[in-house]
């Protein structure tokens, strides 16, 4: 198994923030993953790193699942086995070419299947589509045992699953059932999604997408207007509400200070606020 030493974690997060991993384990098979999980534990797992805010300090060991399993296997009529390390775009392209679809709205998400299942990635609450819509069952490492968990037992809800913040499980793969879809329709849906993101999402600076999954829009707008945060580091995007961007000199301390401040303001006004980003402190 590949093991990197003193690896900069900022290289692995889309917000480009994070300390170092004294050892980074990169398993490429189930055997290697079990070996690594026993050695390392499961507390610090990184997939696409697109929903992570990692502290600036040193971590003893981190499990990197980018090279673990990239298999996409069409088993029968729209039913697919998909490894945890597959990029969402690769899966969407593959099923579209086969004449299936449904998840084109995830084309803009820079995550891996494993991370997307953990987070139950999807589009906004108002549309309420998410990756779990097409999941049949999820393959996990639980203890030292590999097993399948049926969708009904995965407790999927908005940006949530039994796997989130739960170091008992490592997601290895999943089985999906996709509906038939014409390739032209899929292409148009992807085009529309990318155009919408270009219009609404700030891709000019490193970020981790939405900071909060529940928040008060007026408070975030107010925070933006006050330009809370660090001008040369982490601050609210001027284009996309609820997104923090890293201007180049961003640090964990800046980001966490801003997140806590926003949470405090919510509390002060009796408003609900819940983080979407996963934080390693
Ligand atoms: C530009 C941008 C746009 C985004 N748009 C969206 C969007 O439209 N919708 C949306 O839902 N999200 C969006 N996100 C957030 C993010 O991309 C998703 O949450 C994504 O699914 C995270 O996947 P990942 O592989 O990057 O996970 P990571 O960030 O690597 O990990 C997320 C969490 O899952 C854990 N984890 C990762 N893989 C595994 C595994 N195999 N087994 C067990 N635990 C694991 C990690 O430890 C961490 O706790 C966006 C982010 C960015 C940067």
Image: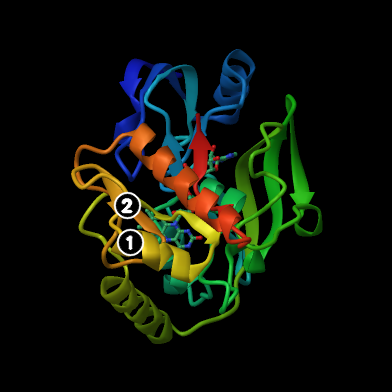
Q: Is residue 17 left or right of residue 67?
A: left
**Where residue 277 sits: x, y (%)?**
49, 48
Q: Nearer the viewer, residue 30 or 188?
A: 188
In this rendering, does residue 85 appear at all? no
Question: Are the residues tagged 2 and 1 within 8 Å (C-beta)?
Answer: yes
What is the crowding at mark 1: few (fewer than 14 residues within 10 Å), some, or many (at least 20)? some
**Where residue 179 sits: x, y (%)?**
60, 77
Work out whether 7 lies above or below 227: above
Residue at x 20% of width, y 58% of height: 204
Give the residue at mark 2. Answer: 228
Quarter of the rendering containing residue 105:
bottom left
Q: Is mark 1 on a helix, strand or loop?
A: helix
Residue at x 27% of width, y 76% of height: 199
**Where residue 91 sits: x, y (%)?**
46, 60
Work out whether 106 lies above or below 280: below
Work out whether 223 lies above or below 13: below
Disc 2 to disc 1, how far (Cα)?
Answer: 6 Å
Give the residue at mark 1. Answer: 224
Q: Which residue lies furthest to the right in this view?
A: 153
Q: Which of 82 and 24 is in front in this view?
A: 24
Q: Is mark 2 on a helix, strand or loop?
A: loop
């Amino acid at each position: 198994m590949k093991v990197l030493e003193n690896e900069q974690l900022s290289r692995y997060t889309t917000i480009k923030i994070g300390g170092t991993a004294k050892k980074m384990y990169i398993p490429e098979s189930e055997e290697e993953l079990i070996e690594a999980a026993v050695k390392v534990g499961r507390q610090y797992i990184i997939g696409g790193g697109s929903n992570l805010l990692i502290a600036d300090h040193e971590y003893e060991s981190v499990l990197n699942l980018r090279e673990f399993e990239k298999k996409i296997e069409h088993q029968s009529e729209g039913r697919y086995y998909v490894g945890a390390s597959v990029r969402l775009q690769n899966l969407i392209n593959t099923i579209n070419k086969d004449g299936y679809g449904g998840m084109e709205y995830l084309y803009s998400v820079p995550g891996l299947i494993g991370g997307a299942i953990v987070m139950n990635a999807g589009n906004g609450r108002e549309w309420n589509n998410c990756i779990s819509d097409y999941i049949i069952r999820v393959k996990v490492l639980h203890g030292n045992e590999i097993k399948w968990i049926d969708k009904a037992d995965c407790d999927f809800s908005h940006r949530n699953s039994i796997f989130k913040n739960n170091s008992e499980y490592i997601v290895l793969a999943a089985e999906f059932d996709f509906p038939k879809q014409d390739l032209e329709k899929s292409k148009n849906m992807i085009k529309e999604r990318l155009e919408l993101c270009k219009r609404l999402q700030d891709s000019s600076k490193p970020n981790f997408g939405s900071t909060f999954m529940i928040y008060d829009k007026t408070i975030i707008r107010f925070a933006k207007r006050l330009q809370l945060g660090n001008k040369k580091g982490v601050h609210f995007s001027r284009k996309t509400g609820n997104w923090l961007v890293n201007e180049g000199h961003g640090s964990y301390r800046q980001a966490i200070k801003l997140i806590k401040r926003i949470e405090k303001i919510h509390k002060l006004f009796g408003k609900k606020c819940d983080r979407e980003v996963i934080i390693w402190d």
